[in-house]
Structures are given as structure tokens and as C-alpha cells.
Image (cartoon, grey):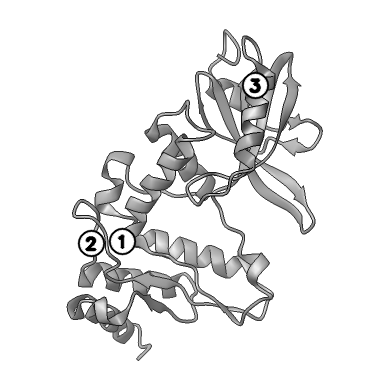
Amino acid sequence: MLQTKSTPAELGRNWAGKVVDDKFPLRQWLGGSDHSAVFLTERATGGGARKAAIKLIPAQNLDGDAQLSLWKSIARLSHPHLIQLFECGRCQIEGTRLLYVVMESAEENLEDLAGCSDFIRPAVYNNVAGGRFVSYVKGARGSVYGDLPPEATLEMLYKQLNYDEAPHDKLAATGFSADYVERETRRSVEAVAGHPVQIWPGVDIDVPVSAKESHCTPESVAQAVKAAFKGGAEGIILSRNYIEMKPENLSGAGKALRELGAI
């Protein structure tokens, strides 16, 4: 336990607003276990402050040097299924000695790309997102979140991203909702506000998935297309090789565009 008489949730409420190592403010408690607490934070970069996540674990009864060495080793690795680690060290909060590690937030920063193109295509693939996010959770638990069960890891990531999607055991089969498409499109539009760049989300149609994962239907495609425009998209990109798209599912996009008066 982080403290013998407090749960991680109680510590989260108490520690929100504290600053770790004089540079990482604890903005919001995201989740944790009996042995850790994770917060939303910020880290300084050449382009200004960026969102990040910070994990705190108790230093008591722990080989701190070995743990910090492990995190530094992971930070040198590069793999799409590994969460990127930025910095680690020691700190103390209200008398509790802790180790901390700062890592990437699950939220992507599109402003960095705004000056590189006249349009950006966020891949809001809601049908395949369920299975892919389950894989992301598995990768996260393979490094810094190994003490959290899959359900708690997923919930923590949902908090980072402000998502409200299916639970872990149903996520692959249901995929993400059309509401996810709308929210991610709107977030992308807001991220590039003030820049001469348009947001054209990519809507997935018949991207290959396993038999147990969510599959496209004409209605799911239509809902995703409508959600993208509701989120402020200037247009959409139907993502997958056209020869692989089933005509009935492709027709869902046409139906939505006609109902929206776009064609």
C-alpha cells in the first residue's frame, strides 16, 4: 500500500495538486492499485507543456535502484505496443517516499502536425478500435502497468482520453461507438483551431479483423460518417482498399452523405 491507512483513491484525492520533483504537477487521479497510483500530469518540452501520465509507487521495501534501472531500460525501447517512458526518479509526498515514472499520455497531440499539411486524417476506426485497444491494454500491462488488471488499465486509459466505451470483456466484439468518432473528430478540430488545416477523419470499412471482433455493417458505417461530420469534419476518407470493401457496407457511407446533403 502507498500508506497503511489509505487507499490509492483516497491518496489520489489528497495528492491532486501536489508537484512531484518540482516539475510534474499531479493534475488528476486516473487510477491505480494497492501498490500504485497514476495521475495525469504535464512535462516541459521545447514546444511547451505536454500532457503525460505519471505513476507513483512506494519506495519502502523496494530495491529502488533496480526499479529505476528497469524503467530506464524500457525507456530505450521502441515498439508500437510499448508505452514510451520519458523520465523516472525519486520523490516524497507528505512523508511518503516514492518512485515515479513519467510516460506518454494516450492522447495524441495533432497540433504538432498542423503546419505540415493542408489536411490531417485522424484514423477514427471505430469498428476495429475495440480489438486494437485491447491489444494496447495488453502492451501497457507488459511494461509499467503490470500491477493493474486489464479492467483497471482500460478504465485508467478511458479517463485519460475521456472515453465511455464497452468494458474490457466486451470491447473487441463491440468495437467503439459512433460517439467515439464524433468526440475524436471534434477534439482534432479543436486541436488545430487557428491553423490553415482541415480535418478529414478516416472511417474504416471492412478492415480485416478476427472472427471474434466487431465487423462493419451498412448501419455502423452510416453512423460513423454522420458522427464525423457532426464533430466538425470538412470531409471524410473511406479507409481500406476499395476493392476489399463490401458494396453493401460502402453503400452505408453513401446513404449517410445523401442524408447529410453532402452529395
Instruction: Locate the C terminus and report the quarter of the image it occupies.
Output: bottom left
Query: Against 163, is 184 above or below?
Result: below
Sequence order check: which comes first, mark 2 or mark 1?
1
Q: Whole-percent x and y of residue 194?
A: 69, 74
**Quadrant placement of the N terminus:** top right
Side of 227 where 245 appears, left or right: left
In the picture of the structure, the residue carrying the numbered disc 2 is: 215
| Disc 3 element | helix
Report the residue at 46% width, 35% height from top.
142
In this rendered view, identify the residue nearer to me: 255 or 50: 50
Q: Which mark is residue 13?
A: none
Residue 159, how many percent across, how many down?
A: 50, 43
Q: Nearer the viewer, residue 64 or 19?
A: 64
Residue 192 at x, y percent in the picture? 63, 70
Which is in the foreground here, disc 3 or disc 1?
3
Does the CB distance between marks 2 and 1 fall below 8 Å?
Answer: yes
Position above or below: 142 against 224: above
Element on which disc 2 rests? loop
Residue 73 as seen in the image, left or right of residue 226: right
Q: Which residue is mark 3?
A: 66
Whichever of callouts 3 and 2 sits on the residue coming sooner in the sequence is 3
Q: Looking at numbered disc 2 in the image, what kind of residue is underneath it?
A: His
Residue type at numbered disc 3: Ala
